[in-house]
Image (cartoon, helix red, strand yellow):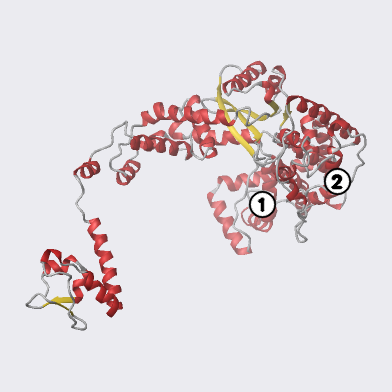
Amino acid sequence: MAEKGERCSSKVWDYFSKDSSNAVFCNICAANVSQGSIKAKQKNTSNLWTHLKTKHSEQYKEAQQQSEVQKTLSVRTQQPTLPQAFDKVLKWGPSDPRAKNLDKKVMEMIATDIQAFSVVEGVGFRRLLAAAEPRYTLKTEKFYRTDKLHHVHAKVVIKIKELLAVENAKHIAFTTDCWSGSTESLMSLTAHFIDEEWNRVQVVLNVKAMSGSHTGEYIGQLFLDMLTEWDIDSERVLLVLRDSGANVVKGMRLVEMPDLSCSAHTLQLVVNDGLQAQRAVGDILAKLKRCATHFGHSVPAKQRLEQIQKDVGLPEHRILQACPTRWNSTLHMLQRMQEQKRALTVYSGDFGHFTCPSVEEWDLVEKLINTLEPIEEITLEVSKSDASASCIIPTIEVLKRFLETQGPETRGIQTLRKVMLDSLIRRFSKIAESKEAVLACVLDPRYKQRPLSDSTTKKAKTWLEKEADKQHQASSAATHKGAEEYSKKPRMEKSLDQKQSVLDHLYEDMLQSQQTVTGVSESLNEELDRYLQEPVLDRKTGDPLQWWRQNAGRFQTLAPLARRFLTPPPSSVPSERVFSTVGAIYQDRRSSLTGSKAEMLCFLYYNLPLLNWQY
């Protein structure tokens, strides 16, 4: 038999043995097999493996598998070298690239997850990192707050400046807003542009701490200072979307910036005008608000209502309260009240505490919902991250038509609808004078000139001619590939079973009305004529930037203008959303956070993902 050491050296010896003369024979078939030499040092197992492979294939495969396992175990149990052993025990130094990389990752986590700096002092977090990487020494809270935050912020700023360079963003639109917290007042600035690949880019630049009196002069100068900080010339500013605050309006006027009121904010003013205009509406809203307040302040009331909801088979939804600063919260309250009508009636009869609306008042609630739902639909549309100022004029035109309609569903709230219509017309009376809004509408293949009056269409053509002349003098028109391929593709048709709202029908009626285009400027070489005569894209499924990406080659003069005027959003909602993040940053555990650090954290929160953490 083979000796123990020999058998352990190779798995092939599990199938072979030696006799007293050291001759090798197969344990399966008893055949003698040579080891290749008489001398012990020159003997090998090649013939043994060959014999197994040719005579006993199953045992050969088994021996091979066992050999692979033996090799793996040998590698795992191999004794580490001296440097490897020390590397597993010794801590990384502060200058070790691996330690610096983990420092950066911890800082990124704090910013992108909106964590307090004190998270690094937590026992659980320290135990986690110690288990994941024992060689890394987690730094103190002060290190990340005073050192690493500034280091990471400075690097990301460089990358964002490269992104905003004039060769990437020739024309930039901005949204701005102001916010006051418990310890700081901040002014936000968000940049918007369309890059050479027709992708919409949104960059949060600042949430700058404000000091002193927030006058128009102060806001205007602060806006210019922020532009200077990002190396952006005022000539590159296409449009500034802001709220209707008198100081903000004055500030933009003083620094001579092209500006426009936030359409979502203006729609809120229109709705508020209507809700306050009719006494019957005010009475029913006050009654429902008292009802919502009762359930909001009483846990037993919520529990009783939940039991009633189960008994009558209604969804177990809580009652919603209206918020004065968000008009659509009033709509949501009305919708929830209507849904829980039966449960509220039972509760009022059994427990009292509030007076349930009468049959006539419930009918009024339904009519209010039918009036407010389309307005909310439009508000959500203009608040989307990919929305363009091109939708402002079409939405105003559709809302006018909607509020002008009368019928059984509007009986009892005609005064409200009329006040809303008058407010809408008054507050958007100058929108046709906004070159940016008008040209955005014309250059959006979903709308073109359809929502415009004849006089505004003529004005648009004059503006386009002037802009094309400026463009021709500055540089030659850009050309893009893909126009021929797209022109051969059939237009996307609307699904037959697609649900249509009342707004869909009004949009369809407006966009199907063909207007005769006359007097097209000769300087546009009939491009505008060809563009306007083509069918419009479907409003819901069509992507205007995708359309221009594929058709820029056919409209080489209009395409650069489209990239420019489709840039502005229709509202300042992007800047308002920033303040929700700021509110989360100013949490209880860091209510004393300074404005400058809050700005840096908010900046990193938005722009680290934008750069895919590559900086």
Residue 328 point in image, percent of width and height: 69, 43
Viewer-nearest residue: 193 or 429: 193
Residue type, mark 1 in image: Arg
Residue type, mark 2 in image: Met
Helix, strand or loop at label 1? It is: helix
Q: Name the residue under label 2.
A: 510
Mark 1 neighbour class, 10 Å CA radius: few under 14, some 14 to 19, many 20 or more: some
The quarter of the image holding the N terminus is bottom left
Q: Which residue lies furthest to the bottom in this view?
A: 29
Residue 326 quadrant: top right
Helix, strand or loop at label 2? It is: helix
Mark 2 neighbour class, 10 Å CA radius: few under 14, some 14 to 19, many 20 or more: some
Residue at left offset 83%, top offset 48%: 535
Left or right, 172 with reference to 124: right
Residue 414 point in image, percent of width and height: 85, 43
The label shown at residue 336 is 1
